[in-house]
Amino acid sequence: MSRTDTTKVGTRGADDAGKRQRLSVHQVGLYILVTAIVLFAALNLEKVSVDVVFTSIRMSLVFVIAAMAFVGFGAGYLHARNRGTR
């Protein structure tokens, strides 16, 4: 570059300044779903008994809800990832 060249490498152009990326409908739906799960879990703090194959575990319902939400999101992610391979 010459000494008079004022453009900087790696910076945004003047056209991009002030523009924000818009959220898609899927992102908004995901944010609403996650917020609802967090609020629902936070309001359910009582202890519950969870029966696992050969034993029973007592834990707070918030952990059960959070674990099942995590399992559900993971299963959905894996299913969506493998949809195109059939």
Image (tube, rainbow, N blue to C red):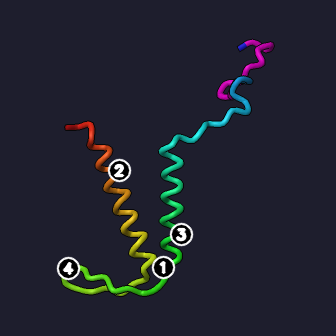
Calculate the distance from the C-alpha at mark 2 to the C-alpha at mark 3. 22 Å
The residue at which mark 2 appears reads as 77
Calculate the distance from the C-alpha at mark 1 to the C-alpha at mark 2. 26 Å
Q: Position of residue 42 (x, y in %)?
A: 52, 75
The residue at which mark 3 appears reads as 39
The residue at which mark 4 appears reads as 53
Residue 38 vertical position relative to residue 73 in the rendered view, above or below? below
Binning the other alpha carbons within 10 Å of mark 4 as few (below 14), some (14 to 19) or many (20 upward) gives: few
In the image, taking residue 27 as reference, residue 48 lies left or right, namely left
Which amino acid lies under the numbered mark 3 shown in the image of this protein?
Answer: Leu
Foreground mark, 4 or 1, reads 1
- Say which mark, if any, is on residue 44: 1
Residue 31 vertical position relative to residue 67 in the rendered view, above or below? above
Calculate the distance from the C-alpha at mark 4 to the C-alpha at mark 2. 26 Å
In the image, taking residue 55 as reference, residue 1 lies left or right, namely right
Locate residue 3: give its quadrant. Answer: top right
Binning the other alpha carbons within 10 Å of mark 1 as few (below 14), some (14 to 19) or many (20 upward) gives: some
> Which of the marked residues, 4 or 1, is nearer the chain's N terminus?
1
> Which of the marked residues, 3 or 1, is nearer the chain's N terminus?
3
Which amino acid lies under the numbered mark 2 shown in the image of this protein?
Answer: Tyr
Foreground mark, 2 or 3, reads 3
Q: Position of residue 22 (x, y in %)?
A: 60, 38
Q: Are marks 4 and 2 in contact (CB under 8 Å)?
A: no
> Which of the marked residues, 3 or 4, is nearer the chain's N terminus?
3
Q: Residue at x 43, y 82 (%)?
A: 60
Calculate the distance from the C-alpha at mark 3 to the C-alpha at mark 1. 9 Å
Calculate the distance from the C-alpha at mark 3 to the C-alpha at mark 4. 29 Å
